[in-house]
């Protein structure tokens, strides 16, 4: 069975124009202004329209509402001093005179121009990076008053307060790596724009009357690559199994793109010259090692020394989804359970913008939020700074079962992790091969059957009052396959599979990525 992974996201492009004469020497400070254009493109890589995410068995990707950008704030920072050099607030993408509607790859987008950005104001190295925050209009005036990046990530100064989560108004944020501008070329900054909330999908509730004999079996339903690194608990286990000295994605020591190796004298050279190492761009998520760093050669056009470098080997994290099915043979069929009310307590409505590496949200709303939902709907919450107080109270009526035949039900699922080793050819990485049940054994994959994630099954106590039954589900009681608590992480979705069996509530929670599209920012020419 071929599994097609659908992802959605938001892309952003910043275009800048910098000019210099052919007589300029490398190392001298450029003079003059720079015109800066910001293009924000919003679109789903799939043409599939999903309006009710919780009803889709394929773990629905972000909806058109969830990727919507109503307003946004963008700031450009000096890569060494972290001082803000330019920013812009777009109060309404639909009507603002400062934004131009554009089309990028057949998707709708927005274009914003910056003028009078001076290269000479940048520190040595000419490094810049971008920060983007969307759908947080109450925060933009505060952000525009900041001068340094540290103010943006200080939770004591910068916080988003949400009283009611709406799918088309979800806050998102992202920050690019710092990249050195190279005169005469366009530099691309990649900004992973992430949902600041987590999404919980509540499906239907099925009632099962269990009797007679039963059997179970496991089936591998899909293989996939991890487009982002797993959480610390899983990643630390994987790292402990790897003997090679590797550098992981997101590590500041991982080399990519054009890197200025500083200015120094080549042997028998009378003057100092700039030296650049050109590394691979757009590296897939994983671990890299065995760097190839040849001698420098003279580039007459750029009047500098250059060399083409790359990592010769890499490890990509893969995982397989293993589902356990249970067959029940009985003279009784499934009973019925009709919910009359599903109440939620403990939703967190406060967050910082989560731009400090892998740190989690440190803020909590006072008081926590609550409400009610129906089956086949989704709701949202920000991360929690400590134990998750989220609680669902499900009230409904049960009905008797009738005679029937054997049925098979998926009762649990787990992700088993592994690594795939690849060697780079002289012409670059060939890309990650498609993983299917037919070819999975053709690749150098090491599976770690004891490293699992994303499955939890729990029973909640029930109380009866006549024909009505109430079940209480406390999120803090959920544990994964290793017995660890199930945290709620921003940028992920959690699908709840709920069933009633012998007057107990059973819940299976599967965690999956929500949106994973990177944001591209071009700055400089």
Image (cartoon, helix red, strand yellow):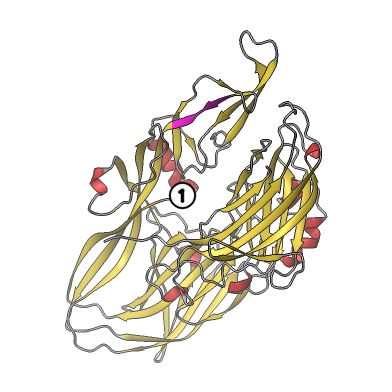
Which quadrant would residue 414 be assigned to in this image? bottom left
Work out whether residue 454 or residue 470 is closer to the camera in this orientation and state it.
454
Question: Left or right of 130: which side holds 332?
Answer: left
Question: Left or right of 130: which side holds 282?
Answer: left
Say whether residue 308 is magenta.
yes
Principal secondary structure, stretch drawn in magenta: strand
Residue name at image x 24 percent, y 60 percent: 218
> Can residue 154 be seen here?
no
- On the image, numbered disc 1 is attached to which residue? 230
How far across and down, in percent of the image, does residue 70 sit? 67, 69
Q: Residue furthest top?
A: 268
Work out whether residue 7 or residue 223 is closer to the camera in this orientation and state it.
7
In the figure, 245 relative to 431: above or below? above
In the figure, 175 relative to 468: above or below? above
Q: Quadrant of the C terminus?
A: top right
Residue name at image x 45 percent, y 66 percent: 46
Residue name at image x 64 percent, y 43 percent: 186
* Helix, strand or loop status at disc 1: loop
Range drawn in magenta: 306-311
Residue name at image x 32 percent, y 64 percent: 412
> Can residue 415 be seen here?
yes
Say whether residue 149 is magenta.
no
How far across and down, in percent of the image, does residue 105 sit? 53, 61
How far across and down, in percent of the image, does residue 151 sit? 76, 49
Q: In which quarter of the image is the N terminus?
A: bottom left
Which quadrant would residue 2 be assigned to in this image? bottom left
How far across and down, in percent of the image, does residue 58 sit? 38, 68
Q: How many labels does the image show?
A: 1
Which quadrant would residue 448 be assigned to in this image? top left
């Amino acid at each position: 069975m071929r599994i097609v992974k659908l992802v959605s996201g938001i892309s952003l492009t910043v275009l800048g124009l910098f000019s210099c004469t052919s007589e300029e020497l490398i190392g001298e400070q450029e003079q003059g202004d720079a015109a800066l254009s910001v293009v924000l493109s919003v679109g789903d890589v799939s043409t599939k329209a999903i309006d009710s995410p919780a009803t889709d068995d394929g773990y629905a990707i972000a909806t058109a509402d969830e990727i919507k950008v109503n307003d946004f704030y963008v700031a450009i920072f000096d890569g060494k001093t972290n001082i803000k050099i330019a920013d812009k607030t777009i109060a309404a993408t639909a009507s603002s005179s400062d934004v131009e509607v554009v089309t990028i790859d057949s998707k709708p987008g927005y274009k914003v121009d910056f003028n009078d950005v001076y290269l000479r104001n940048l520190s040595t190295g000419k490094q810049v990076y971008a920060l983007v925050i969307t759908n947080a209009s109450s925060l933009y005036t505060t952000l525009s008053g900041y001068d340094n990046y540290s103010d943006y990530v200080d939770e004591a100064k910068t916080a988003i307060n949400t009283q009611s989560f709406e799918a088309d108004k979800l806050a998102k944020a992202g920050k690019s790596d710092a990249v050195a501008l190279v005169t005469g070329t366009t530099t691309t900054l990649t900004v992973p724009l992430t949902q600041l909330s987590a999404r919980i999908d509540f499906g239907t509730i099925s009632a099962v009357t269990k009797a007679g004999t039963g059997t179970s079996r496991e089936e591998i339903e899909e293989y996939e690559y991890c487009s982002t690194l797993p959480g610390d608990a899983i990643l630390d286990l994987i790292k402990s199994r790897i003997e090679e000295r590797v550098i992981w994605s997101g590590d500041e020591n991982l080399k990519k793109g054009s890197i200025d190796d500083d200015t120094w004298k080549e042997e028998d050279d009378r003057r100092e010259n700039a030296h650049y190492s050109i590394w691979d761009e757009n590296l897939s998520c994983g671990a890299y090692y065995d760097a190839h760093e040849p001698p420098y050669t003279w580039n007459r056009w750029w009047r500098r020394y250059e060399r083409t470098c790359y990592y010769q080997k890499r490890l990509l994290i893969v995982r397989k989804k293993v589902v356990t099915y249970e067959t029940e043979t009985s003279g009784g069929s499934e009973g019925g359970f009709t919910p009359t009310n599903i109440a939620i307590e403990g939703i967190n409505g406060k967050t910082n913008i989560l731009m400090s590496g892998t740190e989690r949200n440190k803020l909590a709303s006072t008081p926590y939020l609550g409400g009610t939902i129906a089956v086949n709907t989704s709701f949202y919450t920000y991360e929690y700074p400590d134990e998750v107080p989220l609680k669902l109270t499900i009230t409904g009526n049960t009905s008797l079962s009738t005679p029937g035949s054997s049925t098979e039900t998926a009762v649990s699922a787990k992700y088993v992790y592994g690594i795939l080793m690849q060697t780079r050819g002289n012409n670059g990485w060939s890309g990650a091969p498609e993983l299917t049940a037919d070819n999975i054994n053709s690749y150098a994959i090491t599976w770690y059957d004891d490293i699992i994630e994303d499955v939890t099954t729990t029973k909640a106590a029930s109380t009866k009052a006549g024909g009505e039954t109430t079940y209480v589900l406390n999120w803090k009681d959920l544990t994964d396959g290793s017995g660890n608590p199930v945290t709620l992480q921003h940028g992920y979705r959690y699908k709840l599979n709920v069933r009633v069996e012998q007057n107990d509530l059973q819940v299976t929670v599967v965690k999956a990525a929500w949106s994973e599209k990177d944001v591209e920012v071009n700055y400089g020419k």
